[in-house]
Image (spheres, helix red, strand yellow):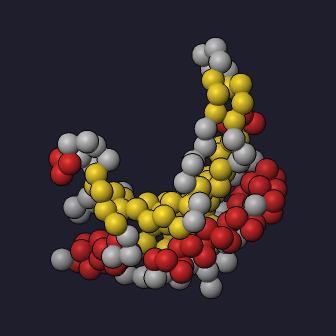
Amino acid sequence: MIWYFGHKRPYDKIAEHMTSGYLEEDGETGIKRYFLEVGEYTVSLKMPTYLCEGGYICISRTRGYTGVLGEPGEILEGDDLLVSIYIWPKYFKGYTVGIEFMDDYNSIWEQVEVDSNLEIIDSEEYENLELILKLMEENADEINLLVSIAEENLGIDIVD
């Protein structure tokens, strides 16, 4: 009972704003996900499994990231940097937010946890802090857009 009200219920409330479907072709025996299209972006939600955590909300460009591969391990070309945010409802109140930057062509894959002011948490733990700060600054408009998609379409408040 505590698990449901403290952890799963926030996911259920967010899912009310979305449509559901199955990732596998065999219907209800497949993996159920919740989706919402907002312009060029997709919001997806994975529910936590019973008595576990493991759920999340992800928002990123609908077309995702694509690249052209050559020889094994060789990337010939790739899309622009893909910026995504991940949101994990905390027990009872609030959210944990992560930002991911991915660009295989330029060998960029950085993930960072931020607070409700979108400032890095435990910045001393990141090896590539300078790069992460640069990516956050260069992509501030897109990060703010992703946050606004979450707030306006899912009924949640991330940023103070």
Q: In this view, does 75 lie above or below 138?
A: above
Q: Is residue 65 left or right of residue 124?
A: left
Q: Position of residue 45 (x, y in %)?
A: 40, 62
80 in relation to 2, above or below:
above
Residue at image coords 37%, 81%: 92
Q: Is residue 56 left or right of residue 121?
A: left
Snapshot quadrant of residue 34:
bottom left
Between 154 and 115, the residue placed more toward the observer is 154
Residue 62 showing in the rendered view? yes
Residue 6 in the image, given as x and y percentages of width and height: 31, 78
Identify the residue at image location x=23%, y=63%: 51
Q: Is residue 153 above or below residue 74?
A: below
Rendered location of residue 52, percent (x, y): 28, 60
Q: Quadrant of residue 60?
A: bottom right
Q: In which quarter of the image is the C terminus?
A: bottom right
For the image, the number of numbered tags is: 0
Location of residue 28 with respect to 20 vertically, above or below: above
138 left or right of 12? right
Farthest residue toward the top? Answer: 71
